Image (cartoon, helix red, strand yellow):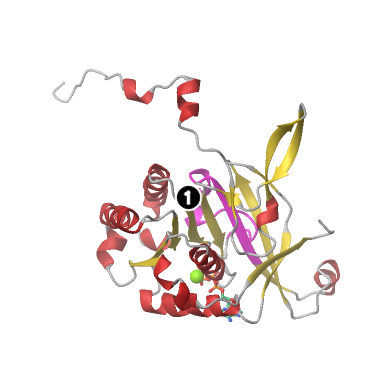
Amino acid sequence: MENYQEPQVLKESIYVGGEALKKAPEIVGVPTGIEGLDDLFFTIKQIDGKLKQVPLGGIPKYSVFNITGVSDTGKSLMVEQFAVYRARQGDKVAFITVETPANFVAASLKYRAMAMGYDFSEFEDNIILIDAASHWKLRENIPDLLATLAYAIKEYKIDYTIIDSVTGLFENKEMMARSIVRRIFNFLKKWYQTALLVSQKRSGHEDLSAEAAGGYAVGHIVDGTMVLAKELIMSQYAARIYKAQLGELVRFFRIDGCRMSGHDTKTHFMEITETGLVRIKEPIGGKR
Ligand SMILES: Nc1ncnc2c1ncn2[C@@H]1O[C@H](COP(=O)(O)OP(=O)(O)OP(=O)(O)O)[C@@H](O)[C@H]1O
Ligand SMILES: [Mg+2]
């Protein structure tokens, strides 16, 4: 056979446990600025010989999350809120915008900051926008996108990355969804980013499932998924169980798995305030 190659041993891929552990980052929480979210993650620690659940106080550092939901469920609001909050803490955040041109996103971020009671001008340069909406090459060519992001990470010392949305990176080529998301995921891990990737869900999928990106199981690749959903209350039954009015729109939030830490598994009510702030509330069917 012409193309036959003797199988190769990749010794650099083998680590004994202790060696791998030395490279393992300690899991700490990153506060998100999203009310009600930070309490939902925890870790297990040994205290006085007993195993105890200790709250992380945020999403696990270095985690890559998939934020999914149908249109208008608050995904963009949520990641913008996170970007603004981290930037205000003095962190550098890369915001890759795939659908909306950068100037519109900047206006939205400024508005978000105002709603949170911050003066955007004090930290606006901590958010580094990468405009893949206006530059089709970044959308169509993942190596160009990642090279641009690598450059920005080095240049601005970025620790946090947002992509809104990854779905826009595999438009018309959904069979590529997994491989594209995997490349992005591996890249973000290599660069020690804590990242939120928005992915759009078809309304045909069950609302509160993590199935997104046309069913291509993006959730299996990333560290965890947060699902945002909404329901229009059109029956007395729904009105009663959700304690809502007929015709009201009720919003839900759920963490669908997180590999890097323990997490709450209940479905929570979610609110988008009049000023556009996302807030996670009590679980359906009882107080926390
Ligand atoms: N001040 C506000 N600014 C923006 N959105 C607001 C505000 N107040 C309430 N909202 C609600 O938030 C929703 C927008 O959510 P968002 O843009 O985050 O949706 P999304 O999940 O990103 O949707 P898509 O998949 O279409 O991008 C609006 O439809 C609106 O109902
Ligand atoms: Mg959006």
Report the magenta residues as a range: 205-229
Measured from the top left, where is residue 249 in percent x and y? Answer: 70, 76
Q: Nearer the viewer, residue 249 or 117?
A: 117
Farthest residue, direction left: 2
Q: Is residue 241 above or below residue 142?
A: below
Quarter the N terminus occupies: top left
Crowd tier of the residue under label 1, counting other residues whose Cα lies within 10 Å: few below 14, some 14–19, many 20 or above: some
Q: Is residue 185 above or below residue 16?
A: below
Question: Is residue 228 rendered magenta in the image?
Answer: yes
**Of helix, strand and loop, which one carries label 1?**
loop
- Is 194 situated left or right of 207 in this image? left
Q: Which residue is mark 1?
A: 216
Asked whether mark 1 and ligand 1 are closer than 8 Å, the reply comes as no
Q: Residue at x 65, y 47 (%)?
A: 56
Question: Is residue 227 rendered magenta in the image?
Answer: yes
Measured from the top left, where is residue 221 in percent x and y? Answer: 48, 44
Q: Residue at x 51, y 52 (%)?
A: 215
Q: Is residue 77 above or below residue 151?
A: below
Q: Residue at x 76, y 26 (%)?
A: 49
Measured from the top left, where is residue 202 in percent x and y? Answer: 53, 63
Measured from the top left, where is residue 200 in percent x and y? Answer: 50, 63
Q: Amino acid at mark 1?
A: Tyr
- Is 60 situated left or right of 10 in this image? right
The image quadrant that residue 190 belongs to is top left
